[in-house]
Image (cartoon, helix red, strand yellow):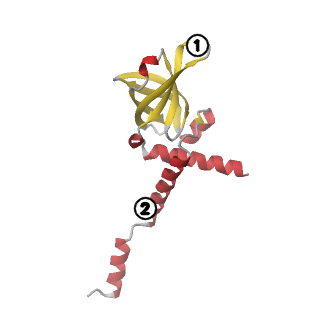
Amino acid sequence: GLVGSEMCIRDSSQRPPDSLIQILGVMLEASSVSKKRKDERIILTPDTTRKLGFEGKNASLVIDNVPRNAIIRDFSFAGMKVIILGNAKFLINKKFILNINMKDGKKMQISGTIKRFETVEGRKDICALALEYDEKSIPMQYTLILNSYFQTVKVKKAK
């Protein structure tokens, strides 16, 4: 049989570390918040760019293996609105891969489908695309960043 101290060591090694439990809790909360606030949009401003850790408003959008420069206008847990050059009527229902540059030098990649386009008032050379993410392609990092942002917004409103 096991002696008391050996049993204690075995019990503690079978238990997940507190840090893992905390991380899983944060991930579960972020996942829950992402479902509740799925369609709440965040407009990208210099302030939100800094808080979210984005490098800037620029992103790369790959459609039909053609990379395009895009400017992020706003986004949510479920999608993003970007501005691109050209007329995008023919891009509706096409698949995309979106690359977002982060301040730390990393890239976040999300894929999905282009749902609609809007003309930009007074500009015939650019348009806005509404992107809907494939739920399975959303990186946990993206969900955690948005969750963290919404927590700071909640705190500010409470004051």
- Circle 1 Cα neighbour tier, 10 Å, few/some/many (<14 / 14–19 / ≥20): few
Residue closest to the eye, 35 or 153: 35
> Label 1 is placed on what type of residue?
Arg
> Which comes before the other along the chain, label 2 or label 1?
2
Q: Secondary structure at mark 2?
A: helix
* Residue found at the far right of this picture: 159
Q: Position of residue 19 (x, y in %)?
A: 45, 62
Comparing labels 2 and 1, the label whose residue is closer to the camera: 1
Left or right: where 53 falls relative to 9: right
Instruction: Report which quarter residue 57 is drawn in.
Output: top right
Q: What residue lies at 46% left-to-right and 34% top-to-bottom?
A: 132
Q: Secondary structure at mark 1?
A: strand
Check the image and report above or below for 121 versus 57.
Answer: above
Q: Quadrant of the N terminus?
A: bottom left
Q: Position of residue 32 (x, y in %)?
A: 51, 52
* Residue found at the far left of this picture: 1
Q: What residue lies at 42% left-to-right and 31% top-to-bottom?
A: 113
Question: Dot 2 corresponds to which residue?
Answer: 20
Separation (CA) of disc 2 from disc 1? 51 Å
The label number, if any, that marks residue 53 in the structure image: none
- Circle 2 Cα neighbour tier, 10 Å, few/some/many (<14 / 14–19 / ≥20): few
Residue closest to the eye, 112 or 65: 112
The label number, if any, that marks residue 123 in the structure image: 1
Q: Position of residue 9 (x, y in %)?
A: 35, 78
Check the image and report above or below for 3 versus 84.
Answer: below
Q: What residue lies at 39% left-to-right and 67% top-to-bottom?
A: 16
